[in-house]
Structure formats: C-alpha cells, structure tokens
Amino acid sequence: MSAAWFHVPSLAESGIVWIPKDEAKHAVGARRLGPGDAVTLFDGAGHVGTGVVTDQRRHDGALAIEVSGVTTAPRPKPVVHLAVAIPKGDRSATLIESCMPFEPASITPLACERSVQRLSAHLAARLDRIALEACKQSRQPWSCAIGTEVSPEAAVRANVGRALILHPGGAPLREAVGGLDAVTVLIGPEGGFSDREVAACEAAGAVRVGLGATILRIELAASAAMAVLRLGGV
C-alpha cells in the first residue's frame, strides 16, 4: 500500500516539515502512524515530498515529518480551467470530488441567469477543503482554490487559452481542443445557459462544444468534460 498523503501549506525542500494539527491528528489517530512510518506530503502547488513520521510534536499540535526528497510534478496538457455553475446541496461536493482527480488548474463558479446556488464565503471554504481531500484521495499533487463567482461572459473575457462553452449543438469537445496548451470550459446550471448568455459568450470569443446528445447534470457534465480532455473520447 502506498504511503498516506498529507497536505502542508508549502513544500520546497528536504528537511523537517511540520504538518498542521488537523493533519497530525488524522495521521496519529485515524491512520495510527508512528515514528518511522512513511508518508507523502504535498502542498497543492505540484510539490510532493517523501518522508517519515518523527516523534516531535509542537505545542500547537503540529507533527514533524523528516522529508528526504521533494519533486515537482508537471501539469498535464492541456491546462484546463473550469468555469461552472455550482449545484445545490451535496452535489456541489460531488462536483469538486469528481473533477479534482483530473487536475483542473482552476475552478471558477458561474453566476448564471438560471443559477439556483450562489457562492457564499462559507460554501467556498467548504469546497476548498473538499478539493484538498479529493487531491489526497486521488494522489493528485495539484489543487486549486475555488475562485470568485463571475458571469459567463466575464469568464470568457478573462479566460486562459481558448474558451469553450458546453451547449447543445456544439462540435465534439475533443475536436475543439486540437492540441491547445490551455482551455477554459464553461458549464451552465440546470436548464443550461440562456440564449442571451450563449450569444454574449460567443460574441466574446467562446466556441460552442458538446458532449453528445444526452443532457447531463452539472457535476456529471463537469467530470465528463474533464475526462474527455484527459483521457480522450467525445
């Protein structure tokens, strides 16, 4: 079994690295790790360190890890930025959990005409935590914070790489990527983008794309789009 993963705020070089109280509690309690046990640390910025648990504890509950080596994982191409309407309830967690293993470079919530869930500070903080947990579970060295909520048109105008808007009638998603280094993929709420939003996004330079004839829920559309871009397909 591979070593358990734990998150640290930053990881640049070998030596003693302190994992925060909550991570330390999980390591010692739930995982029953002790001095000499192997662990893997990551900082969400592509840095991954291998090390072992020590017997050193700080007054704030942090646990010392002796890190013997740090590597930097490259981002896969294309770099994918998601701009997506956030679904209600636990489906927002499912959205983040299902997308993070495919390494999105950013996740920007969309405020759409048909949105039923708006992003609050509390929800953003919760989704940030879920993103980190998903990275640990999937052994994914790159995480991303949940961005500020914007309109679809604003997401297109601020896009990195080519902007692709998922909407019926679009060309197959995979064909629209065509060897690009970076893309921004827009995914709308239940009921889809309005005609006005689609027109405004296309006027700003977005290209309409699709995932076939089936209508997908937000979280499934997001993870399907990430899978297509990472694994190939539609």
Image: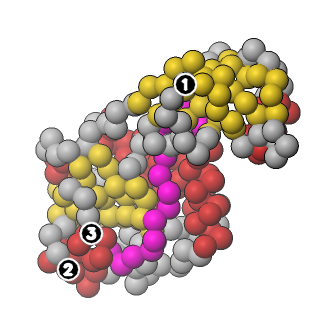
Give me the disc on residue 14: 1
Residue 27, given in percent of the width and then of the height, sits at: 77, 32
Kind of element beneath mark 2: helix
Mark 2 or mark 3: whose residue is earlier in sequence: 3
Query: x%, y% of residue 199?
Result: 20, 80
* Neighbours of disc 1 within 10 Å: few (<14), some (14-19), many (20+): some
Quarter the N terminus occupies: top right
Residue drawn at x 17%, y 63% as measured from the top left? 207
The reply to whether residue 125 is visible in this rendering is yes
Front in this rendered view, residue 50 or 140:
50
| Mark 2 or mark 1: whose residue is earlier in sequence | 1
Disc 3 to disc 1, C-alpha distance: 37 Å
- The kind of residue on which mark 3 rests is Ala
Q: Residue 96 in the image: x percent, y percent?
A: 53, 53
Tell me the kind of residue under disc 2.
Answer: Ala
Q: What residue is rendered at 62% in x and 63% in y?
A: 125
Q: Amino acid at mark 1?
A: Ser
Q: Report crowding for label 3: few under 14, some 14 to 19, many 20 or more residues within 10 A (C-alpha).
A: few
Q: Residue 158 shows which numbered tag? A: 3
Q: Main secondary structure of the magenta part?
A: loop
Q: Which residues are magenta?
A: 135-152
Q: Quadrant of residue 42?
A: top right
Q: Is 44 on the left or on the right of 185, as rendered?
A: right
The mark lying in front, picked from 3 and 1, is 1
Image coordinates of residue 146 in percent, x first then y, are 50, 61
Residue under label 2: 199
Tell me which residue sits at (23%, 49%) in the image: 182
- Considering the numbered disc 1 on the image, is that residue within a helix, a strand or a loop? loop
**Residue 106 or residue 65, whichever sits in front:** 65
Between circles 2 and 3, the one closer to the viewer is: 3
Q: Earlier in the sequence, mark 3 or mark 1?
A: 1
